[in-house]
Image (cartoon, helix red, strand yellow):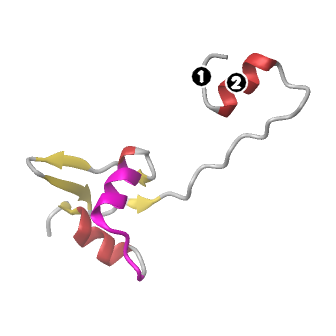
């Protein structure tokens, strides 16, 4: 059995219906929501057969008394 497989084949085995489209799977892979991360081999995205989907990370709690620089970093990371 191959250690890697195409990302859509993995999704059919790993996820329940409805299966996300390939574009969504690739976006999630780039955001780090699949571990170990998929990789591009030629024109196809491949993934380890033991990979798992990771739940979305929680957003940090921003309190009103936080330092303004910390708030800026936690919100979107841009300068004022």
Residue to which mark 2 is pinned: 72
Dividing the picture into quadrants, the one containing residue 3 is: bottom left
Residue to which mark 1 is pinned: 78
Instruction: Out of 26 and 1, give the one closest to the viewer.
Output: 26
Badge 1, how many Cα within 10 Å: few under 14, some, many 20+?
few
- Sequence-wise first label, 1 or 2: 2
**What's the residue at 68%, 30% (across, down)?**
74
Within the magenta stretch, is there residue 12? Answer: no
Is residue 35 in view from this perspective?
Answer: no
Check if mark 1's residue and mark 2's residue have beta carbons within 8 Å.
yes
Is residue 45 in view from this perspective?
Answer: yes
- Quick one: SS at disc 1? loop
Q: Is residue 43 left or right of residue 8?
A: left
Instruction: Out of 70 and 9, give the one closest to the viewer.
Output: 70
Q: Is residue 15 placed above or below 28 in the rendered structure?
A: below
Q: Is residue 33 placed above or below 50 in the rendered structure?
A: above
- Residue extending farthest bottom: 17
Prevalent SS, magenta region = helix
How far, Cα to Cα, is label 1 from label 2? 7 Å
Residue 76 image offset from top left, x and y in percent: 61, 31
Badge 2, how many Cα within 10 Å: few under 14, some, many 20+?
some
- Residue extending farthest front: 80
Residue 59 image offset from top left, x and y in percent: 68, 45
Q: In this view, does 62 lie to the left or right of 56?
A: right
Instruction: Out of 76 and 6, give the one closest to the viewer.
Output: 76
Residue 48 image offset from top left, x and y in percent: 26, 57
Residue 9 image offset from top left, x and y in percent: 23, 72
**What's the residue at 8%, 47% (across, down)?**
42
- Residue extending farthest right: 65
Q: Which region of the structure is painted magenta?
A: 17-29
């Amino acid at each position: 059995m191959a250690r890697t497989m195409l990302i859509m084949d993995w999704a059919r085995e790993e996820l329940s219906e409805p299966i996300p489209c390939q574009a969504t799977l690739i976006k999630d892979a780039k955001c780090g929501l699949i571990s170990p991360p998929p990789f591009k081999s030629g024109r196809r995205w491949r993934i380890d057969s033991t990979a798992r989907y990771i739940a979305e990370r929680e957003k940090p709690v921003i309190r009103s008394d936080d330092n303004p620089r910390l708030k800026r970093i936690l919100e979107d990371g841009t300068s004022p």
